[in-house]
């Protein structure tokens, strides 16, 4: 990562997103801490400042086109580029097979998939101006076709995560397709996009019941966000940096 790289992390007012923002700032990035709720984002930024870590809170709701456009305009005016985008904003809604409705699924897809597309689409011109643009989509090990088909004992309650895992699997395919498209575009060939699982990490989403800390979970995301120029693109990596298809 180049010194002073400009990074935006969505859904960063708590948990893995907050820790990703912290670790990127400690590595020398200029970090924009994205949060749907402006007050929570500001409070999160203040919590980092107490530890000597400076970030700038910005409001963005990935499901609101006006909010995404407003942030894009601000970045254009203030910076004229973006080096790192971490699409961390995401939601989980548990439901059994019998209770998994179209509405519930649509809500998850709107944030976890369409929200990422909205951010990439809006910010692609700014990212293209970076000498080393990086996009990281936050996925889940439970979205792995290989592990699921093998009968692996994946963490969490498998009986209630149907729609969630489907949304993260869709995000992984989007990552692959974006990478293929970027390679064919002379103006975007220098861009790298990957998805990563932070592993079974203790967050508010799971009631802090998982064994990994947010610090551990954020490492995989930060590694992909700061890839060298010869790093991979279009991969889905687990918390240890291994391909996780």
Image (spheres, rainbow, N blue to C red):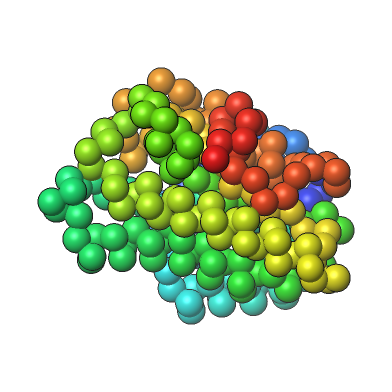
Residue pushed farthest left? 98
Q: How many marks?
A: 0
Image quadrant where residue 131 sits = bottom right
Residue 4 position (above or below residue 66): above
Residue 133 position (above or below residue 200): below
Q: Which quadrant of the figure contains the N terminus?
A: top right
Residue pushed farthest front? 150
Q: Position of residue 225 (x, y in %)?
A: 69, 45
In the image, taking residue 151 as reference, residue 67 lies left or right, namely right
Q: Nearer the viewer, residue 148 or 122?
A: 148
Q: Position of residue 3 (x, y in %)?
A: 85, 45
Q: Residue at x 37, y 47 (%)?
A: 165
Q: Residue at x 74, y 69 (%)?
A: 126
Q: Residue at x 38, y 62 (%)?
A: 109
Q: Nearer the viewer, residue 20 or 183?
A: 183
Image quadrant where residue 231 sits = top right
Q: Residue at x 49, y 73 (%)?
A: 67
In the image, taking residue 144 as reference, residue 235 lies left or right, namely right
Residue pushed farthest top? 211
Q: Which quadrant of the figure contains the C terminus?
A: top right
In the image, taking residue 176 as reference, residue 226 lies left or right, namely right
Q: Is residue 114 visible?
A: yes
Q: Nearer the viewer, residue 169 or 28?
A: 169
Q: Is residue 12 visible?
A: no
Q: Position of residue 6 (x, y in %)?
A: 74, 55
């Amino acid at each position: 990562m180049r010194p002073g790289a400009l990074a935006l992390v969505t859904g960063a007012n708590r948990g893995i997103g907050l820790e990703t923002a912290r670790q990127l700032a400690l590595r020398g990035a200029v970090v924009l801490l994205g949060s749907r709720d402006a007050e929570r984002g500001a409070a999160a930024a203040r919590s980092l400042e107490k530890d000597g870590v400076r970030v700038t809170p910005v409001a963005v709701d990935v499901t609101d086109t006006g909010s995404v456009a407003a942030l894009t305009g601000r970045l254009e005016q203030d910076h004229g580029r973006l080096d790192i985008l971490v699409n961390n904003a995401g939601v989980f809604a548990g439901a059994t097979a019998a209770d998994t409705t179209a509405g519930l699924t649509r809500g998850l897809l709107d944030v976890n998939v369409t929200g990422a597309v909205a951010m990439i689409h809006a910010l692609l011109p700014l990212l293209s101006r970076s000498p080393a643009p990086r996009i990281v989509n936050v996925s889940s090990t439970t979205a792995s076709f290989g592990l699921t088909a093998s009968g692996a004992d994946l963490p969490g309650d498998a009986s209630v995560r149907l729609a969630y895992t489907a949304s993260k699997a869709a995000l992984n395919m989007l990552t692959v397709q974006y990478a293929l498209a970027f390679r064919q575009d002379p103006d975007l060939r220098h861009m790298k996009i990957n998805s990563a699982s932070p592993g079974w990490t203790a967050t508010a989403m799971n009631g802090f019941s998982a064994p990994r800390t947010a610090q551990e979970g954020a490492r995989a995301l930060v590694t992909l966000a700061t890839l060298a120029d010869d790093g991979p693109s279009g991969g889905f990596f687990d918390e240890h940096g291994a391909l996780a298809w």
